[in-house]
Image: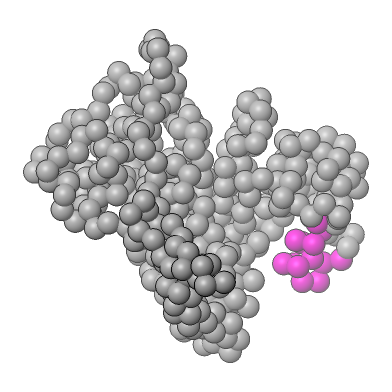
Amino acid sequence: MALFKKKKIQSIGDSQYLTLREERKIAKENAKITKAYEKRKNRTKVPESEYLTEMRDPKNVVEFDNLHTYFYTDVGVSKAVNGVSFDIPEGSIVGVVGESGCGKSVTSLSLMQLVQAPQGQIVEGQIRYKATNGKCYDIAKMPRNEMLHIRGKEISMIFQEPMTSLNPVFTIGAQLDEVVLLHEPGTTKEQAKARSLEMLKLVGIAMCEKVYDSYPHELSGGMRQRVMIAMSLSCNPRLIIADEPTTALDVTIQAQILDLLRDLRHKIQGSIMLITHDLGVIAEMADYVVVMYAGRIVEKGTVREIFHTPKHPYTIGLMKSKPSVNKLVERLYSIPGQVPNPINMPKHCYYKNRCEMCQECCEGDFPELMQFSETHFAACHLYRDNKDLVIYDSLTTGAESEKAEVAHE
Protein backbone atom coordinates (compact mmCIF):
# COMPACT_ATOMS: atom_id res chain seq x y z
CA MET A 1 0.00 0.00 0.00
CA ALA A 2 2.89 2.37 0.79
CA LEU A 3 4.39 1.79 -2.63
CA PHE A 4 1.08 2.62 -4.24
CA LYS A 5 0.84 5.94 -2.39
CA LYS A 6 4.26 7.02 -3.64
CA LYS A 7 3.39 6.32 -7.25
CA LYS A 8 3.43 9.38 -9.52
CA ILE A 9 0.88 9.92 -12.26
CA GLN A 10 1.58 11.76 -15.52
CA SER A 11 -1.16 14.31 -15.98
CA ILE A 12 -0.53 17.51 -17.90
CA GLY A 13 2.57 17.25 -19.98
CA ASP A 14 5.79 15.32 -20.39
CA SER A 15 7.50 17.36 -17.67
CA GLN A 16 4.76 17.68 -15.04
CA TYR A 17 3.64 14.97 -12.63
CA LEU A 18 1.26 14.85 -9.68
CA THR A 19 1.35 12.59 -6.65
CA LEU A 20 -1.84 11.04 -5.35
CA ARG A 21 -1.71 13.42 -2.36
CA GLU A 22 -1.60 16.41 -4.72
CA GLU A 23 -4.51 14.99 -6.70
CA ARG A 24 -6.61 14.60 -3.55
CA LYS A 25 -5.81 18.19 -2.57
CA ILE A 26 -6.90 19.47 -6.00
CA ALA A 27 -10.07 17.34 -5.87
CA LYS A 28 -10.95 18.74 -2.43
CA GLU A 29 -10.53 22.34 -3.61
CA ASN A 30 -12.52 21.67 -6.77
CA ALA A 31 -15.35 20.14 -4.75
CA LYS A 32 -15.76 23.39 -2.80
CA ILE A 33 -15.81 25.46 -5.99
CA THR A 34 -18.25 23.26 -7.92
CA LYS A 35 -20.55 22.97 -4.88
CA ALA A 36 -20.92 26.75 -4.83
CA TYR A 37 -21.74 26.85 -8.55
CA GLU A 38 -24.28 24.01 -8.25
CA LYS A 39 -25.96 25.66 -5.29
CA ARG A 40 -26.42 28.83 -7.29
CA LYS A 41 -27.87 27.00 -10.32
CA ASN A 42 -30.29 24.90 -8.26
CA ARG A 43 -32.04 27.89 -6.69
CA THR A 44 -35.77 27.93 -7.45
CA LYS A 45 -37.05 31.32 -6.28
CA VAL A 46 -34.77 33.63 -8.25
CA PRO A 47 -36.03 37.11 -9.21
CA GLU A 48 -36.19 37.52 -12.98
CA SER A 49 -34.28 40.78 -12.78
CA GLU A 50 -31.18 38.80 -11.76
CA TYR A 51 -30.80 37.16 -15.18
CA LEU A 52 -32.49 39.73 -17.43
CA THR A 53 -30.15 41.75 -19.67
CA GLU A 54 -30.08 43.63 -22.99
CA MET A 55 -28.76 42.63 -26.40
CA ARG A 56 -25.85 44.63 -27.74
CA ASP A 57 -27.42 44.39 -31.23
CA PRO A 58 -31.19 43.76 -31.49
CA LYS A 59 -30.61 41.93 -34.81
CA ASN A 60 -28.83 39.08 -33.01
CA VAL A 61 -30.48 35.98 -31.57
CA VAL A 62 -27.53 34.97 -29.37
CA GLU A 63 -24.45 36.87 -28.21
CA PHE A 64 -21.52 35.07 -26.57
CA ASP A 65 -19.57 37.63 -24.55
CA ASN A 66 -16.24 36.58 -22.98
CA LEU A 67 -17.53 33.08 -22.19
CA HIS A 68 -15.36 30.90 -19.92
CA THR A 69 -16.39 27.28 -19.35
CA TYR A 70 -14.02 25.22 -17.20
CA PHE A 71 -13.83 21.58 -16.12
CA TYR A 72 -12.53 21.02 -12.60
CA THR A 73 -10.59 17.73 -12.81
CA ASP A 74 -8.34 15.88 -10.36
CA VAL A 75 -5.25 17.04 -12.26
CA GLY A 76 -6.20 20.71 -12.58
CA VAL A 77 -8.66 23.08 -14.22
CA SER A 78 -9.29 22.41 -17.90
CA LYS A 79 -10.15 25.69 -19.64
CA ALA A 80 -12.21 24.17 -22.46
CA VAL A 81 -13.71 27.54 -23.45
CA ASN A 82 -11.49 30.45 -22.50
CA GLY A 83 -12.91 33.86 -23.44
CA VAL A 84 -15.11 33.24 -26.50
CA SER A 85 -17.11 36.13 -28.01
CA PHE A 86 -19.21 36.01 -31.18
CA ASP A 87 -22.77 36.68 -32.37
CA ILE A 88 -25.46 34.66 -34.12
CA PRO A 89 -27.61 37.07 -36.19
CA GLU A 90 -31.27 36.40 -36.95
CA GLY A 91 -31.91 34.20 -39.98
CA SER A 92 -28.24 33.34 -40.53
CA ILE A 93 -26.01 30.26 -40.38
CA VAL A 94 -22.87 30.62 -38.26
CA GLY A 95 -20.27 27.91 -38.81
CA VAL A 96 -17.88 26.97 -36.01
CA VAL A 97 -14.76 25.09 -37.16
CA GLY A 98 -11.61 23.73 -35.57
CA GLU A 99 -9.89 20.49 -34.63
CA SER A 100 -11.26 18.07 -32.05
CA GLY A 101 -10.72 19.46 -28.56
CA CYS A 102 -10.93 23.13 -29.56
CA GLY A 103 -14.07 23.85 -27.53
CA LYS A 104 -16.73 23.91 -30.26
CA SER A 105 -19.15 21.46 -28.66
CA VAL A 106 -18.56 22.83 -25.14
CA THR A 107 -19.53 26.29 -26.42
CA SER A 108 -22.83 24.93 -27.75
CA LEU A 109 -23.46 22.87 -24.61
CA SER A 110 -22.89 26.01 -22.53
CA LEU A 111 -25.64 27.72 -24.51
CA MET A 112 -27.98 24.79 -23.75
CA GLN A 113 -26.85 24.52 -20.09
CA LEU A 114 -25.90 20.90 -20.77
CA VAL A 115 -22.25 21.04 -19.70
CA GLN A 116 -21.48 17.96 -17.64
CA ALA A 117 -21.85 18.94 -13.99
CA PRO A 118 -20.57 19.24 -11.35
CA GLN A 119 -17.10 19.21 -12.97
CA GLY A 120 -18.11 21.46 -15.87
CA GLN A 121 -19.14 25.02 -14.98
CA ILE A 122 -19.63 28.39 -16.68
CA VAL A 123 -17.37 30.54 -14.56
CA GLU A 124 -17.42 33.88 -16.36
CA GLY A 125 -19.03 35.79 -19.23
CA GLN A 126 -22.52 36.19 -20.64
CA ILE A 127 -24.67 34.26 -23.10
CA ARG A 128 -27.39 36.70 -24.10
CA TYR A 129 -30.48 35.24 -25.77
CA LYS A 130 -33.44 37.19 -27.16
CA ALA A 131 -36.54 35.11 -26.49
CA THR A 132 -39.81 35.08 -28.45
CA ASN A 133 -41.51 37.01 -25.63
CA GLY A 134 -39.23 39.97 -26.37
CA LYS A 135 -37.16 39.61 -23.22
CA CYS A 136 -33.40 39.10 -23.22
CA TYR A 137 -31.96 36.49 -20.87
CA ASP A 138 -28.43 35.82 -19.68
CA ILE A 139 -28.40 32.03 -19.96
CA ALA A 140 -25.18 31.81 -17.95
CA LYS A 141 -27.11 33.10 -14.90
CA MET A 142 -30.50 31.45 -15.48
CA PRO A 143 -31.60 28.87 -12.88
CA ARG A 144 -32.19 25.37 -14.19
CA ASN A 145 -35.96 25.40 -13.71
CA GLU A 146 -36.28 28.51 -15.90
CA MET A 147 -33.95 27.13 -18.57
CA LEU A 148 -36.39 24.24 -19.08
CA HIS A 149 -38.79 26.69 -20.77
CA ILE A 150 -36.18 27.61 -23.40
CA ARG A 151 -34.16 24.45 -23.99
CA GLY A 152 -35.88 22.20 -26.52
CA LYS A 153 -38.55 24.76 -27.35
CA GLU A 154 -36.82 27.98 -28.43
CA ILE A 155 -33.28 26.58 -28.70
CA SER A 156 -32.95 23.01 -29.92
CA MET A 157 -29.94 20.83 -30.69
CA ILE A 158 -29.14 18.14 -33.26
CA PHE A 159 -26.55 15.95 -31.60
CA GLN A 160 -23.56 14.41 -33.33
CA GLU A 161 -24.55 10.73 -33.07
CA PRO A 162 -28.30 10.05 -33.38
CA MET A 163 -28.05 6.43 -32.22
CA THR A 164 -26.83 7.53 -28.78
CA SER A 165 -29.26 10.47 -28.64
CA LEU A 166 -32.42 8.44 -29.26
CA ASN A 167 -33.68 6.15 -26.51
CA PRO A 168 -33.52 2.55 -27.81
CA VAL A 169 -36.44 1.29 -25.67
CA PHE A 170 -39.02 3.83 -26.94
CA THR A 171 -40.53 4.16 -30.39
CA ILE A 172 -39.77 7.14 -32.59
CA GLY A 173 -43.34 8.35 -32.17
CA ALA A 174 -43.20 8.25 -28.36
CA GLN A 175 -40.02 10.32 -28.32
CA LEU A 176 -41.35 12.87 -30.80
CA ASP A 177 -44.66 13.19 -28.96
CA GLU A 178 -42.84 13.76 -25.66
CA VAL A 179 -41.25 16.97 -26.96
CA VAL A 180 -44.61 18.45 -27.99
CA LEU A 181 -46.42 17.34 -24.82
CA LEU A 182 -43.66 18.73 -22.63
CA HIS A 183 -43.35 22.18 -24.21
CA GLU A 184 -46.93 22.77 -25.40
CA PRO A 185 -49.24 22.60 -22.35
CA GLY A 186 -52.79 21.52 -23.10
CA THR A 187 -51.85 19.47 -26.16
CA THR A 188 -53.67 16.15 -26.46
CA LYS A 189 -51.99 12.90 -27.50
CA GLU A 190 -53.81 13.02 -30.85
CA GLN A 191 -52.56 16.54 -31.52
CA ALA A 192 -49.03 15.56 -30.52
CA LYS A 193 -49.10 12.61 -32.93
CA ALA A 194 -50.37 14.79 -35.76
CA ARG A 195 -47.57 17.27 -35.09
CA SER A 196 -44.97 14.49 -35.03
CA LEU A 197 -46.17 13.07 -38.34
CA GLU A 198 -46.12 16.56 -39.83
CA MET A 199 -42.49 17.00 -38.77
CA LEU A 200 -41.51 13.61 -40.21
CA LYS A 201 -43.02 14.63 -43.54
CA LEU A 202 -41.26 17.99 -43.37
CA VAL A 203 -37.83 16.33 -43.14
CA GLY A 204 -38.56 14.13 -46.14
CA ILE A 205 -39.32 10.78 -44.52
CA ALA A 206 -41.55 8.45 -46.54
CA MET A 207 -44.02 6.09 -44.83
CA CYS A 208 -44.27 8.35 -41.79
CA GLU A 209 -46.74 6.06 -39.98
CA LYS A 210 -44.33 3.14 -40.19
CA VAL A 211 -41.37 5.20 -38.99
CA TYR A 212 -43.54 6.66 -36.22
CA ASP A 213 -44.11 3.13 -34.82
CA SER A 214 -40.50 1.98 -35.34
CA TYR A 215 -37.64 1.74 -32.86
CA PRO A 216 -34.34 3.58 -33.49
CA HIS A 217 -32.40 0.38 -34.32
CA GLU A 218 -34.84 -0.34 -37.15
CA LEU A 219 -33.82 2.83 -39.03
CA SER A 220 -30.72 3.68 -41.01
CA GLY A 221 -28.26 6.37 -39.92
CA GLY A 222 -29.71 8.91 -42.34
CA MET A 223 -33.25 8.20 -41.16
CA ARG A 224 -32.26 8.55 -37.51
CA GLN A 225 -30.59 11.86 -38.25
CA ARG A 226 -33.75 13.08 -39.98
CA VAL A 227 -35.74 12.03 -36.92
CA MET A 228 -33.39 14.10 -34.74
CA ILE A 229 -33.93 17.09 -37.02
CA ALA A 230 -37.71 16.55 -36.89
CA MET A 231 -37.52 16.44 -33.08
CA SER A 232 -35.55 19.68 -32.97
CA LEU A 233 -38.16 21.40 -35.17
CA SER A 234 -41.23 20.22 -33.26
CA CYS A 235 -41.68 23.47 -31.33
CA ASN A 236 -40.60 25.96 -34.04
CA PRO A 237 -37.29 27.00 -32.41
CA ARG A 238 -35.58 30.32 -33.03
CA LEU A 239 -32.15 28.67 -33.03
CA ILE A 240 -30.98 25.21 -34.06
CA ILE A 241 -27.57 23.96 -32.92
CA ALA A 242 -26.29 21.33 -35.37
CA ASP A 243 -23.28 19.57 -33.83
CA GLU A 244 -21.62 17.81 -36.78
CA PRO A 245 -24.96 16.52 -38.12
CA THR A 246 -23.40 14.73 -41.11
CA THR A 247 -20.26 13.15 -39.60
CA ALA A 248 -21.54 9.56 -39.46
CA LEU A 249 -23.37 9.66 -42.81
CA ASP A 250 -22.32 8.78 -46.33
CA VAL A 251 -21.78 11.51 -48.93
CA THR A 252 -25.19 11.31 -50.62
CA ILE A 253 -27.07 11.42 -47.30
CA GLN A 254 -24.83 14.30 -46.17
CA ALA A 255 -25.91 16.35 -49.18
CA GLN A 256 -29.58 15.62 -48.45
CA ILE A 257 -29.26 16.61 -44.78
CA LEU A 258 -27.47 19.86 -45.66
CA ASP A 259 -30.08 20.74 -48.30
CA LEU A 260 -32.77 19.99 -45.72
CA LEU A 261 -31.18 22.29 -43.12
CA ARG A 262 -30.81 25.07 -45.68
CA ASP A 263 -34.48 24.82 -46.71
CA LEU A 264 -35.69 24.62 -43.11
CA ARG A 265 -33.80 27.76 -42.19
CA HIS A 266 -36.05 29.71 -44.58
CA LYS A 267 -39.24 27.86 -43.61
CA ILE A 268 -38.94 28.46 -39.87
CA GLN A 269 -37.21 31.87 -40.24
CA GLY A 270 -34.64 30.76 -37.68
CA SER A 271 -30.89 30.69 -37.21
CA ILE A 272 -28.46 27.77 -37.22
CA MET A 273 -25.21 27.28 -35.33
CA LEU A 274 -23.36 24.70 -37.43
CA ILE A 275 -20.43 22.86 -35.85
CA THR A 276 -18.31 20.85 -38.29
CA HIS A 277 -14.80 19.83 -39.35
CA ASP A 278 -15.66 19.97 -43.05
CA LEU A 279 -14.61 23.25 -44.68
CA GLY A 280 -16.56 22.28 -47.79
CA VAL A 281 -19.75 22.23 -45.72
CA ILE A 282 -18.87 25.63 -44.26
CA ALA A 283 -18.23 27.09 -47.73
CA GLU A 284 -21.61 25.85 -48.94
CA MET A 285 -23.77 26.53 -45.89
CA ALA A 286 -22.45 29.28 -43.63
CA ASP A 287 -22.88 33.05 -43.72
CA TYR A 288 -20.36 33.67 -40.93
CA VAL A 289 -17.42 31.55 -39.77
CA VAL A 290 -15.79 31.27 -36.34
CA VAL A 291 -12.42 29.47 -36.17
CA MET A 292 -11.60 28.09 -32.71
CA TYR A 293 -8.32 26.75 -31.36
CA ALA A 294 -7.62 25.48 -27.83
CA GLY A 295 -10.72 27.14 -26.35
CA ARG A 296 -10.21 30.54 -27.99
CA ILE A 297 -11.34 32.24 -31.19
CA VAL A 298 -8.35 32.83 -33.48
CA GLU A 299 -10.34 34.22 -36.42
CA LYS A 300 -13.90 35.12 -37.34
CA GLY A 301 -15.62 36.82 -40.26
CA THR A 302 -17.94 36.28 -43.19
CA VAL A 303 -17.49 33.13 -45.24
CA ARG A 304 -15.98 35.15 -48.13
CA GLU A 305 -13.46 36.82 -45.83
CA ILE A 306 -12.36 33.56 -44.24
CA PHE A 307 -11.98 31.70 -47.55
CA HIS A 308 -10.66 34.55 -49.72
CA THR A 309 -8.36 36.32 -47.26
CA PRO A 310 -7.63 34.10 -44.24
CA LYS A 311 -5.40 35.89 -41.75
CA HIS A 312 -4.44 33.46 -39.00
CA PRO A 313 -1.83 30.76 -39.76
CA TYR A 314 -4.13 28.14 -38.21
CA THR A 315 -6.95 29.03 -40.60
CA ILE A 316 -4.48 28.85 -43.49
CA GLY A 317 -3.34 25.43 -42.26
CA LEU A 318 -6.94 24.19 -42.24
CA MET A 319 -7.33 25.43 -45.82
CA LYS A 320 -4.18 23.62 -46.93
CA SER A 321 -5.40 20.40 -45.29
CA LYS A 322 -8.44 20.35 -47.57
CA PRO A 323 -8.01 18.26 -50.77
CA SER A 324 -8.08 20.37 -53.93
CA VAL A 325 -9.29 19.18 -57.34
CA ASN A 326 -7.21 21.70 -59.30
CA LYS A 327 -3.84 21.03 -57.68
CA LEU A 328 -1.74 17.86 -57.94
CA VAL A 329 0.17 16.97 -54.76
CA GLU A 330 2.03 13.83 -53.73
CA ARG A 331 1.01 14.10 -50.08
CA LEU A 332 -1.90 15.94 -48.47
CA TYR A 333 -0.79 18.72 -46.12
CA SER A 334 -1.21 18.13 -42.39
CA ILE A 335 -0.74 20.66 -39.58
CA PRO A 336 2.17 19.39 -37.43
CA GLY A 337 1.54 18.52 -33.79
CA GLN A 338 -1.80 18.46 -32.02
CA VAL A 339 -4.11 20.66 -29.95
CA PRO A 340 -2.50 21.24 -26.52
CA ASN A 341 -3.96 20.00 -23.28
CA PRO A 342 -6.21 22.80 -21.96
CA ILE A 343 -4.81 22.43 -18.41
CA ASN A 344 -2.21 25.03 -17.41
CA MET A 345 -2.07 26.69 -20.81
CA PRO A 346 0.88 29.03 -21.47
CA LYS A 347 0.49 32.79 -21.62
CA HIS A 348 1.81 33.05 -25.19
CA CYS A 349 -0.10 32.16 -28.38
CA TYR A 350 -1.38 28.59 -28.08
CA TYR A 351 -0.57 27.89 -31.73
CA LYS A 352 3.06 29.01 -31.38
CA ASN A 353 4.66 25.54 -31.21
CA ARG A 354 2.83 24.36 -34.37
CA CYS A 355 3.03 27.56 -36.40
CA GLU A 356 5.29 27.59 -39.47
CA MET A 357 5.31 31.41 -39.40
CA CYS A 358 6.34 31.79 -35.75
CA GLN A 359 8.57 34.83 -35.05
CA GLU A 360 10.17 36.48 -32.03
CA CYS A 361 7.09 38.64 -31.50
CA CYS A 362 5.07 35.49 -30.79
CA GLU A 363 6.90 35.04 -27.46
CA GLY A 364 4.66 37.67 -25.85
CA ASP A 365 1.22 37.35 -24.30
CA PHE A 366 -1.70 35.82 -26.20
CA PRO A 367 -2.59 38.26 -29.02
CA GLU A 368 -5.80 40.24 -28.91
CA LEU A 369 -8.30 40.05 -31.77
CA MET A 370 -7.35 42.59 -34.43
CA GLN A 371 -10.00 44.06 -36.72
CA PHE A 372 -9.44 44.01 -40.48
CA SER A 373 -12.96 44.95 -41.58
CA GLU A 374 -16.36 45.49 -40.01
CA THR A 375 -16.81 41.72 -39.63
CA HIS A 376 -13.29 40.25 -39.97
CA PHE A 377 -11.12 39.67 -36.86
CA ALA A 378 -7.99 37.60 -36.20
CA ALA A 379 -5.69 37.07 -33.22
CA CYS A 380 -2.09 37.00 -34.50
CA HIS A 381 1.08 38.96 -33.65
CA LEU A 382 2.12 38.97 -37.32
CA TYR A 383 -0.32 41.81 -38.03
CA ARG A 384 0.64 43.95 -35.07
CA ASP A 385 2.57 46.41 -37.25
CA ASN A 386 1.08 45.69 -40.69
CA LYS A 387 -2.59 44.79 -41.09
CA ASP A 388 -2.19 44.55 -44.88
CA LEU A 389 0.34 41.72 -44.61
CA VAL A 390 -0.56 38.77 -46.89
CA ILE A 391 0.66 35.42 -45.57
CA TYR A 392 -1.65 32.99 -47.35
CA ASP A 393 -1.21 31.19 -50.65
CA SER A 394 -4.02 32.20 -53.00
CA LEU A 395 -3.51 29.05 -55.07
CA THR A 396 -4.03 26.87 -52.02
CA THR A 397 -7.28 28.54 -50.99
CA GLY A 398 -8.55 29.33 -54.47
CA ALA A 399 -10.68 26.22 -54.91
CA GLU A 400 -12.57 26.72 -51.65
CA SER A 401 -12.94 30.43 -52.32
CA GLU A 402 -14.58 29.75 -55.66
CA LYS A 403 -16.88 27.20 -54.01
CA ALA A 404 -17.89 29.71 -51.35
CA GLU A 405 -18.44 32.38 -54.02
CA VAL A 406 -20.71 30.15 -56.11
CA ALA A 407 -22.66 28.91 -53.08
CA HIS A 408 -23.57 32.45 -51.97
CA GLU A 409 -24.38 34.08 -55.32
In the image, is 339 to the left or to the right of 129?
A: left
Residue 219, given in percent of the width and then of the height, sits at 82, 39
Q: Which residues are magenta?
A: 175-188
Image vertical order of residue 249 relative to residue 11, above or below: above
| 176 in magenta | yes
Residue at the spot 40% in from the left edge and 12% down from the top edge: 330
Say whether residue 254 is visible. Answer: yes
Towards the viewer: 393 or 86:
393
Would you place residue 251 above or below residue 360 in this image? above
Report the label total: 0
Q: Point out residue 33 in the picture as x, y percentages from the top left corner.
A: 46, 80
Label the magenta part by its dominant secondary structure. helix
Please tell me which residue lies in front, 204 or 377. 377
Q: Position of residue 162 (x, y in %)?
A: 70, 46
| Point 25% across, 44% down: residue | 352
Q: Is residue 133 visible?
A: no
